[in-house]
Amino acid sequence: MLTLNSVGMVFARGTPDENTALKNINLTVHTGDFITVIGSNGAGKSTLYNVIAGTFVPTSGSITLCLDGKNERVITHDKEYTRARYIGRIFQNPLLGTAGKMSLEDNMMICLRKGYKGLKISLNAKMREYFKSRLRELGMGLENRLNDNVEQFSGGQRQALTLLMAVMSEPALLLLDEHTAALDPANAELVMELTRKFAQTYKLTVMMITHNMHHALSFGSRLLMMDSGNIILDVEGEEKAKLSVSDIIERFRRIKNEDLASDEMLLQ
């Protein structure tokens, strides 16, 4: 569905502050993939998301998208607002995904209009019942608070609502950028279980950055590990299912040692 071909991202090129954040990334995201993405700070995870979402234009390579299984098009230079029609993104901060000064029903109305391709829709009794039916999926009682401003909700409620609205907009790809990291453990687990439920129920294509190794292994069908702007591990299916946290740590150490040995050979 989405393909990155030799994508590189260099910041401040040609200056003393030059920084290569992505190095020749080749990645294909298939429809229905649930990919967990791990790596230390500075590994390139957020930069990868930014070039996929259109926040950054890569300095090399190309990005192609195929929504219908037949017609592929290059989106490398498409603006972020253009890609937002088919790529959803949820950030770590639960306040970023909703408009706090607006009511719950108004937030959901904006979300629905974003993904609606037909005639103009209006907020009426039928639409409110639809919103209530979707909000019941969260199990938080928010279906009874349609007129409350979202700023009155807890961080966990706002992030769960952000997730629901992202699902309602029917994205071709949903990018989750450590979307539970700012929540307390109870709310984090609740949002993670909603993530699993929505991904399975609505057959979403998901990429999820996480620093929680247990989540990286127990969620999704595929695992990417990044380091120094490279994808150094890409496993899926049965191979991923057999991995343990200690296996991941050992593979990371082995790959890093191989890279160091290769660098030493180049210097000889």
Image (cartoon, grey):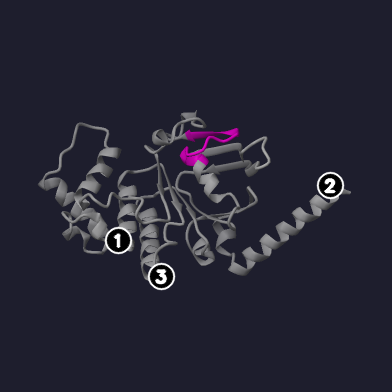
Q: Position of residue 195 (x, y in %)?
A: 38, 58
**Nearest to the observer: residue 163 or residue 35:** 163
Residue pictured at 34% horizontal, 54% vertical: 95
Dot 3 amino acid type: Pro
Write down the region rendered in magenta: 51-65
Residue pictured at 33% horizontal, 61% vertical: 155
Q: Tag 1, which secondary structure?
A: helix
Residue pictured at 53% horizontal, 63% vertical: 217
Disc nearer the start of the sequence (1/3): 1
Furthest residue toward right:
268
Disc nearer the start of the sequence (1/2): 1
Dot 1 amino acid type: Gln
Q: Is residue 85 above or below residue 71?
A: below
Labels 3 & 2 near each other (Cβ < 8 A): no
Q: Position of residue 122 (x, y in %)?
A: 15, 39
- How many angstroms separate mark 1 from mark 3 (CA)? 13 Å
Labels 1 & 3 near each other (Cβ < 8 A): no
Kindly identify which numbered label has been placed on residue 185. Answer: 3
Q: Is residue 50 left or right of residue 8?
A: left
Kindly identify which numbered label has been placed on residue 104. Answer: none
Q: Quadrant of residue 25?
A: top right
Q: Position of residue 167 (x, y in %)?
A: 33, 49
Q: Tag 3, which secondary structure?
A: helix
Disc nearer the start of the sequence (3/2): 3
Q: Is residue 164 left or right of residue 262?
A: left
- How many angstroms separate mark 1 from mark 2 (CA)? 53 Å
Asked if the stretch drawn in magenta spans residue 61, the answer is yes
Instruction: Determine crowd level at label 3: few under 14, some 14-19, many 20+ residues with C-alpha closer than 10 A.
Output: few
Kindly identify which numbered label has been placed on residue 157. Answer: 1
Residue corresponding to mark 2: 266
Residue pictured at 24% horizontal, 56% vertical: 135
